[in-house]
Amino acid sequence: MSAFLTVDNLSAILDGSEHRVLRSVSFSIDTGEVLGLVGESGAGKSMIGKAVLGILPSAIRIVEGEIQLDGHNLTRMKSADRRRLIGATAALIPQDPLTALNPSRRIEPQITNRLVDILGWTKSAARVRALELLNEVHIDNPERVMASYPHELSGGMRQRVLIASAFAANPKLVVADEPTTALDVTVQKQILRLIRELQARHSTAMVFVTHDLGVVSKVCQRLAVLYGGMVVEKSTVPDFFNGPKHVYSQSLLAATPKYTDPDASLLPVDEAVIEHVASEVQAADREWHHEP
């Protein structure tokens, strides 16, 4: 059986330059599987998620590779057809619920408009679905929340609204872009448990973008480690935590807090490791430019 999402040899550049921001990225995800994209800030994790959803910044241009979604080659489709397919098939859980929600609009249309405008639902059917989803994400008094403005809700409640909105149309793929970063630790745990619960219930394929290996261990089956827009290691989660292969992955794991031993010293990523992986990126760029 072919993968539901396949990213093959994907490279993207900053328009007007030859600087690659994504470097020959390849991975695949099966239906119902969660893949973690892991790395430091600036590694290209969110950029990959945006490429899959067709929402890359205008200054970033894909120059090589393919994205296959549910048997369709997104990189060869007309833009209108691509938007229609992605709108019906995929959804995003963004990082910051405060900026992702429109502060001047009530919650109800922010959940229902996608169902009505993109998928052609009636307003009444979309409202019923929105109430069902707010119940599903464990929001008390969903009628009150639907009538509220974002500033009237807590951060955790706003994130639950975004999760409900993402799952409203039963997407086959969800990109979760560091969805717990803006939340405190207690709420983070609740939101992670909720995302995993909904993902498993709906057998949704998921790209989970995070810098936190602890989150990966709880949510994902496989992961890809990135540095400088390049995948340096792909692994199953158990194999990775039993012994990552790449020196950069080893350093990331060593720098992760041990929840079973909170007093253990943290080991920062050594400069020699950064130099090593940076040299791999430079070598990949020279090969891409056909330089000796």
Image (cartoon, rainbow, N blue to C red):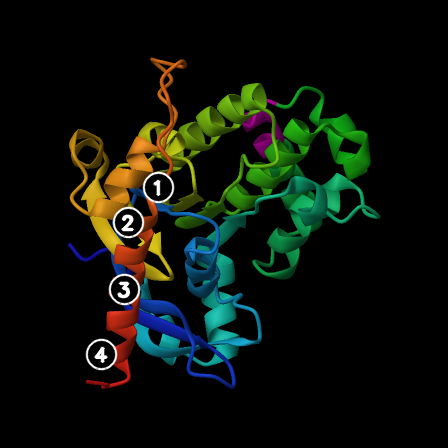
3 or 4: tag closer to the N-terminus: 3
Determine the residue located farthest toward the right in the rendered image: 104
Q: Is residue 112 above or below residue 21?
A: above
Q: Tell me the CA gap for discs 3 and 4.
A: 12 Å
Task: Describe the element under mark 2 as helix, strand or loop.
Answer: helix
Q: Which residue is mark 4?
A: 287
Binning the other alpha carbons within 10 Å of mark 4 as few (below 14), some (14 to 19) or many (20 upward) gives: few
Q: Is residue 289 above or below residue 134?
A: below
Q: Is residue 232 above or below residue 242?
A: below
| Pair 3/4: label in front | 3
**Amino acid beneath label 2:** Val
Q: Is residue 271 visible?
A: yes
2 or 3: tag closer to the N-terminus: 2
Q: Tell me the CA gap for discs 3 and 1.
A: 16 Å
**Amino acid beneath label 4:** Glu
The dominant secondary structure in magenta is helix
Task: Describe the element under mark 3 as helix, strand or loop.
Answer: helix
The range drawn in magenta is 132-138
On residue 269, the disc is 1
Task: Give the number of callouts.
Answer: 4
On residue 273, the disc is 2
Q: Is residue 231 visible?
A: no
**Amino acid beneath label 3:** Ser
Task: Describe the element under mark 4 as helix, strand or loop.
Answer: helix
- Do tag 3 and tag 4 residues touch (Cβ < 8 Å)? no
Does the segment drawn in magenta span residue 269? Answer: no
Residue at image location 65% in from the left, 41% down from the top: 97
Q: Which residue is mark 3?
A: 279
The image quadrant that residue 266 belongs to is top left
4 or 1: tag closer to the N-terminus: 1
